[in-house]
Structure formats: structure tokens, C-alpha cells
């Protein structure tokens, strides 16, 4: 086994930050959580390609038996580190992946941006004395950080007013029509998991439910903070893509948690907002159709089986996403041999230990040995990841659209995949 990891898990500001004005500064937010050590890095094999035909008859028979009369509702693929496709049922049939979509956006962002990347929120002073607040969608941006920006804005100058110093502040933001992916159900947009995707999102635009007008909330919080400091902030909106003037001076910036922390938010905690921001950041554009196009080009360059794949968003909340279990298995195989593969795999939930898998497979042979991303929508269950076995890692993807008792079926499939004697 490899060296034990201490994985960075950021505190979610969306869980009560506004109710807790004493939230500590950014550098105090992350906490270190000990987890099971990852398996050793798979030896580089020149990006092995996933095989086309199942090569382990015994495991193939077990898989067929587990799916029994519900095979039409399932797509399952299992492979080893050499790219050998061990077992496969409907692996090329496209399915709604739910949050397994996040495996795609996080792989893309990590490859494009690297493990040292952070999202920045910045306060600028322009040549005419106006200030501008810019952001990149930091999911952990919270009220204490906004208060810090407001205090710095008031101290930077401004004009005298009847209630104290008055500063003019431009807020660079996306237009309202771009806040939600078009394919998101309108009912979902009212909940915290369907909050709007904006560049300046206090507590990820969610409290108990979604904050559906984040600009109004931002203005209210800025004015309240300024009034407490004996001043006033006059806020105006400018397009996020509007370039900064050449004479702009950076006054202050708040960096997000590291890329490892952002990936863990998306993959361990299945945070939709973070996954959407990572797709946009990795592609270099907040225009979602263009971001999707650039990501799709990158996926094609990885030699993955792209037939039937359709990308609609970064989180999987859009039900028009379509992936195959072979595609996801091939992506996992590719990413585990990527230079940043340890960062990618360690961002996932762990069976019986962490994230969306913390309460599954406790006390079984799978406990601590499954690193995976889960997915859940009405009628959809999915899980894709890496399974630690005595014969090395096995990569798997299981997607059900309409199956009954999918969680129990997935557990049986993984225990069969863990039985290396079937494929000697």
C-alpha cells in the first residue's frame, strides 16, 4: 500500500455561515481528515486503452446472474489496470449518469488547471477611484470575507456623504439568464443543490434553500456591512467579461481552498455548484455551451470511447446528460495513470469512511477499499470508481436507470469484482 494520505476537506460555508458571523478566517477553515491509504500508483503503461470484449468468463457469468431479469435497466463495466475489460453488460448503452457526471468535469479541470489551482475573489481600484469586485465562483466564499472586502473598500477612499464615506463599487457578474444551465428542472432551482451558478456566490448561493437572487443578497450584505462601519457602498453591475482598465490596482484577494479541496467538494460531497464552476474554470469560459464543447474536445483527445456521450452540464443535474459505463471506466483508467492521478482518486468518497459512501458497506470486505463517485436522481443510481483488490486496482462503473433495489445490486457486483480468483 502507498503512503497514507491526509485529505483536505473544506468546511462548507453553506452550512450556516450567515448564522455564524464568527466564522474563522480562510486559513483556519480546512480540516485534515485521516483516510485509508490509496493503493500504489499504477505503473505507467502509456495510457492503456480499454478492451473491447469481456475477458473473464467467470466474472461475466456472475455479473449476468446478479442483474438477472433487470439487465435492460443496467450498464456495468469492470476493468483491470492493464485495460483488460473483465466483465461488461450493456457497457456501450447510454444512460443518465446523475452525479457521475462530476467525474468528467473534475478530471477535465484537474488536467487543465493542475493541483495548485485556486479560485480567486479580488477587489480592484480603478483609475477614477471606482472599485470593482471580481470572482471566479469560490464555493466557500462567506460573509466574513465579504465583510473584509467592504471594510477595505471603505478604507480605500471615496467621497464624503451624510452617513460617512461613500464608495462606488462595480460588481462583475454573469447575466441572470446564465445563472442556471438551461436543462435544469425549474423545481430543482429552488433547492440548495440547484442554486444559481454565479461568480460571486456567498455560501454557494444557498442557505437552507437556494438564494434565487444572489445579486440582491450581495447588495444587501454589502450595504449592511458598510453601514456598520459608518459608510455606504453604492453598487452597480458590470459584465463579468468586461476587461479591467490598464490602470487597475489590486487591493486585496481571497483565494479558495486548493484544487484538492475543490475536487473533494465535487466528488466526495457531490456539491453541484463546485462541479459547475470547475467545468467553467477548466474550459476558460463561463459560456456553458462553449465550455461543454471544449471539454468534449479534450475528452476525445484522451482516446476514450465517445460513442453516444452527451455532455450538458458539469454536475449531472441536467437529465439530458448521457454517458456509458465503458466511457466512465476508461476515464478512470486514464486518470489513475495521469500525472495528477493521486489527487483525482483521493477526491472521491470512500466506502464506510467518507462522503456519500460513509454509510455504505461498513464492516464488509468493501469497507475502505472502494474509492468512488455516487449519483442519484429519481429512477437513477450510479457509482463509478476504483476498487482495491489483491491483484491491484479494478475500475468499474455501474449505472441503473429504472432498476429496483439498485444499492443492494451494486454491493453484490462490487464484492464479485473484488474476488480476484474469478479472473486468474
Image (cartoon, grey):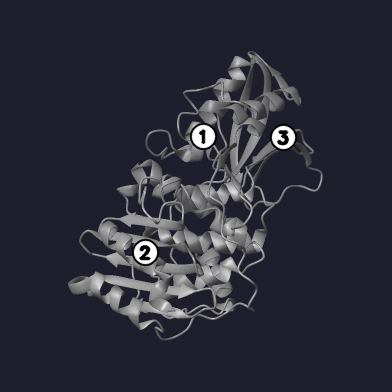
How many numbered discs, if any? 3
Question: Residue 206 location, x and y as percent?
Answer: 44, 37
Q: Is residue 355 left or right of residue 169?
A: left
State the image quarter where residue 150 is shown: top right
Q: In the picture shown, does residue 377 fall above or below 97?
A: above
Q: In the picture shown, does residue 405 fall above or below 353?
A: below
Q: Is residue 262 left or right of residue 98?
A: right
Q: Which residue is mark 3?
A: 130
Q: In the picture shown, does residue 9 fall above or below 328?
A: above
Q: Residue at x 42, y 61 (%)?
A: 100
* Among the two numbered marks 2 and 3 on one chain, the one whose residue lies closer to the N terminus: 3
| Quadrant of the rendering where the C terminus is positioned | bottom left
Q: Is residue 10 left or right of residue 114?
A: left
| Quadrant of the rendering where the N terminus is positioned | bottom right
Q: Residues within 10 Å of mark 2 (few under 14, many from 20)?
A: many
Question: Residue 8 location, x and y as percent?
Answer: 59, 43
Nearer-the-camera pick, 291 or 153: 291
Nearer-the-camera pick, 113 or 277: 113
Q: Which residue is mark 1?
A: 13
* Among the two numbered marks 2 and 1 on one chain, the one whose residue lies closer to the N terminus: 1
Q: Which mark is residue 414?
A: 2
Outermost residue on the left side: it is 69
Label 3: element kind: loop
Q: Residues within 10 Å of mark 3 (few under 14, many from 20)?
A: some
Amino acid at each position: 500500500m502507498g503512503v497514507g494520505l491526509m485529505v483536505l476537506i473544506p468546511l462548507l460555508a453553506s452550512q450556516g455561515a450567515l448564522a455564524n458571523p464568527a466564522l474563522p478566517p480562510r486559513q483556519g477553515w480546512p480540516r485534515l481528515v485521516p483516510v485509508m491509504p490509496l493503493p500504489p500508483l499504477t505503473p505507467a503503461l502509456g495510457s492503456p486503452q480499454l478492451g473491447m470484449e469481456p475477458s473473464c468468463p467467470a466474472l461475466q457469468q456472475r455479473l449476468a446472474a446478479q442483474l438477472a431479469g433487470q439487465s435492460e435497466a443496467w450498464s456495468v463495466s469492470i476493468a483491470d489496470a492493464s485495460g483488460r475489460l473483465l466483465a461488461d453488460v450493456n457497457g456501450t448503452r447510454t444512460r443518465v449518469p446523475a452525479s457521475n457526471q462530476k467525474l468528467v468535469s473534475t478530471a477535465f479541470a484537474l488536467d487543465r488547471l493542475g493541483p495548485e489551482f485556486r479560485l480567486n475573489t479580488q477587489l480592484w481600484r480603478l483609475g477614477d477611484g471606482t472599485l470593482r469586485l471580481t470572482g471566479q465562483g469560490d464555493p466557500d466564499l462567506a460573509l466574513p470575507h465579504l465583510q473584509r472586502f467592504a471594510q477595505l473598500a471603505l478604507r480605500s477612499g471615496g467621497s464624503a456623504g451624510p452617513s460617512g464615506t461613500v464608495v462606488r463599487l462595480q460588481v462583475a457578474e454573469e447575466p441572470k439568464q446564465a445563472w442556471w444551465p438551461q436543462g435544469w428542472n425549474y423545481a430543482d432551482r429552488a433547492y440548495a443543490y440547484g442554486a444559481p451558478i454565479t461568480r460571486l456566490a456567498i455560501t454557494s448561493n444557498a442557505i437552507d434553500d437556494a438564494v434565487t437572487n444572489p445579486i440582491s443578497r450581495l447588495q444587501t450584505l454589502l450595504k449592511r456591512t458598510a453601514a456598520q462601519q459608518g459608510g455606504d457602498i453604492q453598487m452597480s453591475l458590470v459584465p463579468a467579461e468586461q476587461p479591467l482598465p490598464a490602470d487597475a490596482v489590486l487591493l486585496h484577494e481571497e483565494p479558495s481552498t486548493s484544487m484538492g479541496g475543490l475536487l473533494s467538494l465535487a466528488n466526495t460531497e457531490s456539491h453541484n455548484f463546485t462541479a459547475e464552476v470547475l467545468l467553467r474554470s477548466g474550459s476558460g469560459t463561463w459560456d456553458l455551451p462553449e465550455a461543454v464543447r471544449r471539454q468534449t474536445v479534450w475528452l476525445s483527445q484522451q482516446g476514450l470511447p465517445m460513442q453516444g456521450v452527451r455532455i450538458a452540464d458539469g454536475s449531472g443535474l441536467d437529465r439530458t446528460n448521457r454517458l456509458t459505463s465503458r466511457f466512465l471506466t476508461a476515464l478512470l483508467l486514464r486518470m489513475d495513470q495521469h500525472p495528477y492521478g493521486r489527487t483525482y482518486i483521493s477526491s472521491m468518497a470512500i466506502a464506510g469512511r467518507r462522503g456519500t459512501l460513509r454509510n455504505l458497506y461498513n464492516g464488509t470486505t468493501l469497507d475502505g477499499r472502494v474509492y468512488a463517485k455516487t449519483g442519484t436522481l429519481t429512477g437513477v443510481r450510479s457509482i463509478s470508481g476504483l476498487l482495491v483488490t489483491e491483484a491491484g486496482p479494478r475500475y468499474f462503473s455501474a449505472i441503473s436507470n429504472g432498476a429496483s433495489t439498485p444499492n443492494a445490486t451494486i454491493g453484490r457486483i462490487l464484492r464479485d469484482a473484488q474476488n480476484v480468483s474469478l479472473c486468474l
